[in-house]
Image: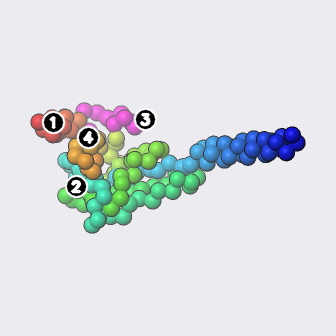
Amino acid sequence: MRNFSAVWKTSCVLGVLFAFLVLFVGCIRGYITVEYVFPDGFRGPAVVRVRQPDGVPECEKDYLRRGSHRCVLTFPPSGVLNTQGEAPITQDQWEATARYANGTAIPIPGVPETSISSNQTALWSLGTIKEGENWLFVGTESEFIKFKEQQQR
């Protein structure tokens, strides 16, 4: 009877330690900031194509890193950016920023503390139009709505 009791206590202690470890790792995991960089003056549609052998290397995915790390996606003038791996926004915890190459910020609707006037250029997200393509749009709200309506036809 004593052996069963000792084994049971040891199992319980190990179970509690494992649960604590899982909880601890989950709490320290960092998040990724995706920074979209566009050529100065860029306007119009932009697409991130994933799983493209000739694309730029995939952003680092360090699920155990404390704090945050940055993934910079720099678009060419065509607005089409091929990446070798998955889109970084598939990670659990992420946020996005956008700017022009000269450093001028591009606001993103829906980001807390961001107000955008109707004639202000912003970065809008269309999501996935085709498998493996994440579509964005740089322009005013009315330009974005017009482009989105054209894509839905």
Q: Quadrant of the N terminus?
A: top right
The reply to whether residue 138 is visible in this rendering is no
Q: Which is more foreground, mark 3 or mark 2?
A: 2
Foreground pick, 81 / 122? 81
Residue at image coords 29%, 65%? 53
User: In the figure, 139 relative to 61: above or below?
Assistant: above
Determine the CA span between mark 3 and mark 2.
26 Å
Quick one: label 3, few (<14), some, or many (20+) residues within 10 Å? few
Determine the CA span between mark 2 and mark 1.
20 Å
Residue 150 lies left or right of residue 137; in this view the side is left
Dot 4 and dot 3 residues touching (CB under 8 Å): no
Which of the 4 image quarters holds residue 2? top right
Question: Residue tagged by mark 3?
Answer: 112
Question: Residue tagged by mark 1?
Answer: 152
Q: Picture coordinates of residue 78 (x, y %)? A: 19, 58
The reply to whether residue 110 is visible in this rendering is yes
What residue type is disc 1 on? Gln
- Outermost residue, right direction? 2
User: In the figure, 60 relative to 115: above or below?
Assistant: below
Question: Residue tagged by mark 2?
Answer: 79
Which of the 4 image quarters holds residue 137? top left
Q: Picture coordinates of residue 13 (x, y %)? A: 76, 43
Q: Quadrant of the C terminus?
A: top left
Q: Which is more foreground, mark 2 or mark 1?
A: 1
Determine the CA span between mark 4 and mark 1.
11 Å
> Magenta stretch?
109-121
- Rendered image: mark on residue 126: 4
Quick one: label 4, few (<14), some, or many (20+) residues within 10 Å? some
Residue at image coords 63%, 42%? 23
